[in-house]
Image (cartoon, helix red, strand yellow):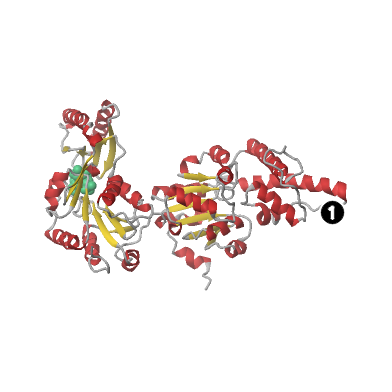
């Protein structure tokens, strides 16, 4: 049964998808009208010349009807052919090197490109602000984004509009020719973009304003196809396969507002994800297994949570991935059968000789030693400050520091980072500044390494990651690529790449308890 657009729209959560693919003209930029004007100029001139010599009746190109039906969204030469066929005109295809205006499909297509270029140079590119805001919001929430356009001018338009930084992947008319891919309404370009992003089609949504584009996204079997009605063609967009139709992307902004669904309330949905799979549990420590407290040494694991972890570990692999020093977090949790990753994943050890100490990280130890001494010298006089040395990181805690001292600490940390001559980088967290080796390694990378080392990266495993802090976002982002579920521990909505939210460590405990009863939860 066909659902009404509004009823579907209410349940949409764009931020819960792993990737979003956007069309350019008409979705992000107002270039659709520039394209249409160039097409009209081309065809009207050509049809008039034909009428003058053949006596055919001149019937102008109609931007309202001809453009969406025959040209919009299609590769250029395909658009020429398709419109001319609608007027029962058949021309030689010619070659892409044909002079602009030559009476071939390619010649006319090349002239259209020239006319478009002139208009672009004269008028510039206007962007839809709401579309840019939506893409930005989705990226903040960890959604990967790609652009798919049949236009060979896509890069020029992106550059003119300063939008390039908003997309991880761009598939345009040049790629379609080069690879080659079949143009819209075939799904090939969309599927290629999803492949480049590494995300399965069912975890991807597409936003399109052209009928051929909507049809292509539907044929790609995407999880959601959104039609944008810029031309009064709502019914046609639905008929071509759109799940919902919006007039403007501002209608979707709230659906990307990172209001993560509560994991306990969505237990059945999560049980569905887990069906036939082996869960693998990854947990952060502070703020996830224990409430955040004033000082690190006061964050003690409750007996109840330890009992729960033991119960879970009897049924599935459990790893703790913490910003703390590995020895510290191992001691605090105190269960031998777990895997422990300390210093944000730089130092890993577990049962059966599992071990990772990044060789490159050793080279950073002298820089960390120097930084520790410099921080002590510059900041230890500040009341309430706590400098915590981990093997591969240093945390500067300011939870107990007076507000007026914050700026001094902030500058002090910056100076030490600068003095490290690019050896160290700075990250944040809950009332801490951290200094870490400037290496492309984080909790997400550690999670990927662990899945491989434990031979749990197959489709029959489902990693679940629980975390509350900035550094946990790297792990959530890793899981966004179709490989698992992220749970943000937070008592209020906030931007995150996780899929679900759990209120606090007690809710984590309750969720773990339920996980033990889900079918297939045994290794
Ligand atoms: O990755 P995690 O296991 O969450 O570790 C992150 C940091 O946690 C600790 O600091 C935080 O928790 C303290 C105790 O609740 C709190 O006082 C502090 O304000 C928090 O930032 C730990 O001390 C750090 O080393 C970890 O990097």
Quadrant housing the C terminus: bottom left
Q: Compared to 483, does 295 lie above or below?
A: above
Expressed as whole percent of the image width and height from the top left, the position of residue 153 reads: 60, 41
Expressed as whole percent of the image width and height from the top left, the position of residue 381 reads: 15, 31
User: Does residue 264 show up?
Assistant: yes
**Looking at the image, which is closer to me, 488 or 408?**
488
The answer to whether the beta carbon of the residue marked 1 is less than 8 Å from any atom of ligand 1 is: no
Q: Give the secondary structure at mark 1.
A: loop
In the rendered structure, the answer to whether residue 137 lies left or right of residue 93 reads: left
**Looking at the image, which is closer to me, 182 or 115?**
182
* Residue 416: quadrant of the picture: top left
**Looking at the image, which is closer to me, 404 or 432?**
432
Expressed as whole percent of the image width and height from the top left, the position of residue 291 reads: 19, 53
Q: Compared to 170, does 8 lie above or below?
A: below
User: Does residue 404 show up?
Assistant: no
Q: Which residue is mark 1?
A: 57
In the rendered structure, the answer to whether residue 380 lies left or right of residue 235 reads: left
Residue displayed at 29% across by 40% down: 441
């Amino acid at each position: 049964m066909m659902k009404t657009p509004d009823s579907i729209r209410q349940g949409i959560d764009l931020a819960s998808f792993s990737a979003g693919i956007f069309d350019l003209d008409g979705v992000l930029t107002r270039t659709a009208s520039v394209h249409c004007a160039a097409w009209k100029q081309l065809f009207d001139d050509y049809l008039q010349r034909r009428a003058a010599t053949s006596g055919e009746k001149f019937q102008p190109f109609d931007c309202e009807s001809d453009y969406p039906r025959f040209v919009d969204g299609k590769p250029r030469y395909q658009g020429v052919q398709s419109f001319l066929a609608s007027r029962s005109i058949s021309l030689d295809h010619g070659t892409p090197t044909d002079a602009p205006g030559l009476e071939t499909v390619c010649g006319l297509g090349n002239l259209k490109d020239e006319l478009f270029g002139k208009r672009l140079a004269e008028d510039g590119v206007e962007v839809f602000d709401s579309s840019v805001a939506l893409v930005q919001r989705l990226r903040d929430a960890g959604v990967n984004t790609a652009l798919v356009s049949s236009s060979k001018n896509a890069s020029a338009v992106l550059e003119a509009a300063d939008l390039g930084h908003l997309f991880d992947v761009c598939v345009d008319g040049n790629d379609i020719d080069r690879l080659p891919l079949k143009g819209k309404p075939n799904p090939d370009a969309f599927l290629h973009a999803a492949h480049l992003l590494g995300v399965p089609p069912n975890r991807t949504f597409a936003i399109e304003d052209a009928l051929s584009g909507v049809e292509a996204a539907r044929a790609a079997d995407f999880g959601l196809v959104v039609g944008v009605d810029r031309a009064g063609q709502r019914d046609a967009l639905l008929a071509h396969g759109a799940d919902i139709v919006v007039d403007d992307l501002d209608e979707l902004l709230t659906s990307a507002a990172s209001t993560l669904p509560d994991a306990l309330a969505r237990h059945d949905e999560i049980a569905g994800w887990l069906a036939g799979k082996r869960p693998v549990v990854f947990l952060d420590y502070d703020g996830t297994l224990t409430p955040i407290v004033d000082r690190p040494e006061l964050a003690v694991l409750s007996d109840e949570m330890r009992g729960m972890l033991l119960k879970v570990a009897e049924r599935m692999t459990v790893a703790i991935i913490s910003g703390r020093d590995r020895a510290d977090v191992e001691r605090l949790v105190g269960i031998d059968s777990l895997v422990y990753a300390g210093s944000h994943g730089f130092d890993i050890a577990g049962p059966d000789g599992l071990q990772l100490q990044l060789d490159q990280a050793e080279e950073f130890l002298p820089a960390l030693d120097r930084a520790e001494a410099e921080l002590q010298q510059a900041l230890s006089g500040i009341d309430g400050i706590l400098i915590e040395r981990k093997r591969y990181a240093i945390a500067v805690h300011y939870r107990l520091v007076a507000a007026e001292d914050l700026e001094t600490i902030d500058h002090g940390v910056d100076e030490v980072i600068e003095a490290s001559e690019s050896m160290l980088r700075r990250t944040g967290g809950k009332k801490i500044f951290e200094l870490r080796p400037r290496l492309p390694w984080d909790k997400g990378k550690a999670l990927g390494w662990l899945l491989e080392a434990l031979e749990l990266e197959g489709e029959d495993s489902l990693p679940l990651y629980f975390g509350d802090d900035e550094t946990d976002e790297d792990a959530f982002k890793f899981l966004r690529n179709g490989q698992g579920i992220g749970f943000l521990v937070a008592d209020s909505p906030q931007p995150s790449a996780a899929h679900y939210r759990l209120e606090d460590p007690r809710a984590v405990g309750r969720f773990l308890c339920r996980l033990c009863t889900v079918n297939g939860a045994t290794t």
